[in-house]
Amino acid sequence: MVPDIIDPIPLAKCRKEASVVPTVDLSAPGAAAAVADACRGVGFFRATNHGVPATLADALEALAAAFFALPHDEKMEHASARPFGYGSKSIGSNGDVGWLEYLLLSVATGSGSSTLPPPLRAAMEEYTCAVRDVGGRVLELMAEGLGLDRGALRRMVAGKDGEESGAGEMVRVNHYPACPLASGVTGFGEHTDPQIVSVLRSNRTGGLQIMLRDGRWVPVAPDPDSLFVNVGDSLQVLTNGRFHSVKHRVAAPEAGKLARLSVIYFGGPAASQRIAPLPELLKEGEESLYKDFTWGEYMKAAYKTRLGDNRLSPFELHHCSSSNAVQPQPPPHVAPVH
């Protein structure tokens, strides 16, 4: 097993309730409105008819599982490009731990992938290309649902024509072995994603949980044929709280169950990208809920925090209540990892 100490890892208890995860058919005529409704409400949705071939996802899943089955010493040979490359148990550099091992790769620079077995590296690149396109199309639907130019959000991740992709674009492969010591052990602690959007695909093993606005944790049923989309904290700021960045976590599989394997694409901007409520979105008299900051400034501050810390807190503005201002839920905590 990858982690060999259980004591510091918290438990993730969750009541079994009916699914509240919205489902959006990305090919349907009303997809933009459905995406916007899901982002305003839960901040999370299941995307069907996304266009990523099942053969790509299945091939990556098989190759990643084979990699994680290697002896620990062999896997550690791919851990030299911190924070990219291979890691196990530690989440970030400030003491957070979980029952998992992972690969973290930079889309822009390729950091973390150069030493991987060539078949796995090729599968990662092919899958990333396909799911990155899905992320871009989702951002276009979000913009359309907000009444913005369709490219307003996508350009922040992909850059303008001829520019490189954003430094915040990353892919993470998480592997959660079955835990023989206890049930409900946290694989990845509660957090929200700091980027603009995240797109997740997992195998048939569950464990993902999201927090509703009333504070209840609910499980997300796994569906390898679908992709799951998270609103990131940067998008919450860009929409001035209209879209909700959902807090989520993962419980490790119990003894006797198959390991959980998930692949997440994070659509983040370049370090110089300004993050602030979009002026064309603000109504007359509506005040900004956040200070302006760049993605680089945000991540520099974020690297100093723990998993449960609210990293948007230093950038929040507090105004007297106004009938014209959007009143979102308080911003949730932000993840200290990519």
Image (cartoon, rainbow, N blue to C red):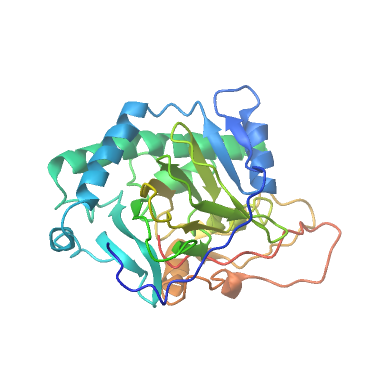
Residue at coordinates 76% horizontally, 71% vertically from top-left?
319
Front-most of 161 and 97?
Answer: 97
Residue at coordinates 64% horizontally, 42% vertically from top-left?
19
User: Total marks drawn?
Assistant: 0
Q: Examine the rendered structure and indicate whether residue 178 appears above or below residue 229.
A: below
Q: Position of residue 37 (x, y in %)?
A: 69, 40
Q: Position of residue 70 (x, y in %)?
A: 17, 53
Dividing the image into 4 quarters, which one contains the N terminus? Answer: bottom left
Residue at coordinates 65% horizontally, 52% vertically from top-left?
279
Front-most of 212 and 135?
Answer: 212
Q: Examine the rendered structure and indicate whether residue 32 appears above or below residue 263.
A: above
141 vs 111, left or right, is right
181 vs 27, left or right, is left
Q: Examine the rendered structure and indicate whether residue 314 appears above or below residue 112.
A: below
Q: Examine the rendered structure and indicate whether residue 128 appears above or below residue 70.
A: above
Q: Position of residue 206 (x, y in %)?
A: 47, 47
Query: Residue 35 lies in what quarter of the image?
Result: top right
Front-most of 166 and 233?
Answer: 233
Any part of residue 245 in sight: no
Any part of residue 225 in sight: yes
Q: Position of residue 233 (x, y in %)?
A: 55, 58
Query: Residue 30 lies in what quarter of the image?
Result: top right
Dividing the image into 4 quarters, which one contains the C terminus? Answer: bottom left
Residue found farthest to the right: 323
Front-most of 161 and 299?
Answer: 299
